[in-house]
Amino acid sequence: MYTPEALLDAVLRQLRAEMSEVLVDPWFTNASPITIQDDVFVVEAASELFRDTLTNRFTDNVSQIITDLLGYQAKPIYVFGAEADSWRLQSDSSVYAGYTFEKFIVGNSNKFAHAAALAVANNPARLYNPLFIYGGSGLGKTHLLFAIANSLRKKYPSYRIVYIKSEDFMNEMVEAVKTSGFTDFRAKYRQADLLLMDDVQFLSGRQSLQEEFFHTFESLFQANKQIVLTSDRPPKEIATLSDRLQTRFESGLLADVQSPDLETRMAMVKSKANNLGIDMPQNVVIYIAENITNNVRELEGAVKKIAAINGLMGSPIDLPMAQNAIKDIFKERPGLNPTAEMVLKEVSAFYSVPADKITGKAQNKEVVLARKVASYLMRELCSMSYPEIGKILNRDHTSVIYGVETLTKTMTKDESLRDAVSDMKKNIQSL
């Protein structure tokens, strides 16, 4: 019986003998075996390029080798990014050992969401389905998703658990259309026992994506499978979400996660310090908790940096050291300083118009609207001058001025357009 690591070692030995080290080793650099499950051997590649190359060049050879080694027909699957995370959740909950209910710091700001997530973990698809957890970035929503997954993996080892971010769901769907792999794409999600989707607000405005996810949702719900979703806002505030998806999301339980109060933040700092094995003075704990108020990840990042300086430099942990160590963390988050590239990416995805068309010469209705919205958002979010926007979009600055002014007038009368622009603005600021 092979472990995933032993199987990959055996495969590489045979593959080198067949094809030579020069052809094999560069592409398997940093490849990481995840699981042997049923008739597939799942391997994480170092990048999307490596994943695609491994799939195209080595699948046939590796299929034959692992079939011979395992004694039954099997094939390799090469994954990267969110798909690798999904397979890890299915195969080994210890990968997310830090994301458990026991390690989630409960306070007034999150105790309802925590209780709801725990109830789902104890009674999947019986009490609250779907569970919709919403709140700002870095407040622990993903921690609760993984805690549910970890709990259910221990209780039901055969559960097929799928975790995905909505943007990755979209990317997989586009790839499935390109490669005629829609059957496999749908099977992956519709055969899940537990579907966890992060950041569903990014479904907004993408009609074909919403249509596909609606049918996925319906298939799982009718099969009595648990669905857990997170968002930075409640369903009713995702303005361009289809009515039927909003209805489905609101049919279960909505649980909000708010910014933690000072007491909870202090508990989080102490817990992280204990996990890292450092003794943090109370005045340092208070300093961090008083200055980082809205983002749990930033709290953890502050503690990690202090611990690193203490360990690497031997600097004692005191208030001056902490103040100097984490002063950069108090700067505004990147999401509050959007770039033109971020705007173009969001507008392109929202309207399903390639970015090169927005910056190109096309004048059809969809492209012109996307170009006006991009101009407006660059002006609004990036504080760019009209000539600067014109340079990005390959337009004269007078054309940019006209586009922004006409869009602004149209939004005063067109509520759906106003909602769409508002959604895009929120999406960009949450990146």
Image: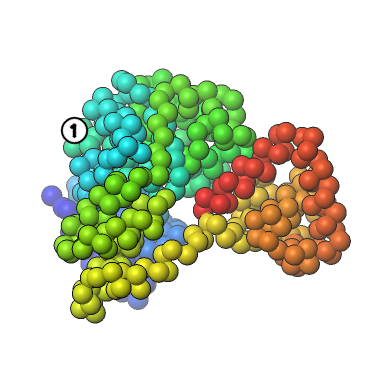
Left or right of residue 303, residue 385 in this image: right
**Looking at the image, which is closer to me, 354 or 304?**
304
State the residue in front, 44 or 384: 384
Q: In the picture shown, does residue 212 fall above or below 172?
A: above
Furthest residue to the left? Answer: 1
* Image quadrant where residue 90 sits: top left
Residue most toward the bottom? 313
Q: Would you call the spot at circle 1 few (<14 residues within 10 Å), some (14-19), or many (20 or more)?
A: few
Side of 222 where 351 appears, left or right: right
Q: Position of residue 185 (x, y in %)?
A: 46, 39
Q: In this image, 132 relative to 341: left or right?
A: left
Location of residue 249 in the rendering, given as x and y in whole percent from the top left corner? 48, 27
Numbered disc total = 1
Q: Position of residue 321 (x, y in %)?
A: 29, 73
In this orientation, does residue 172 appear?
A: no
Identity of the residue drawn at 59% across and 25% down: 243
| Residue most extreme to the front | 283
Q: Is residue 135 left or right of residue 279?
A: right
Q: Is residue 324 visible?
A: yes
- Disc 1: which residue: 155
For badge 1, the amino acid type reads Lys
SS assignment at label 1: helix
Residue located at (33% from left, 55% from top): 289
Taking the spot 41% from the left edge, 40% from the top edge, the residue there is 258
Residue located at (50% from left, 33% from top): 234
In percent of width and height, residue 385 lies at: 75, 65
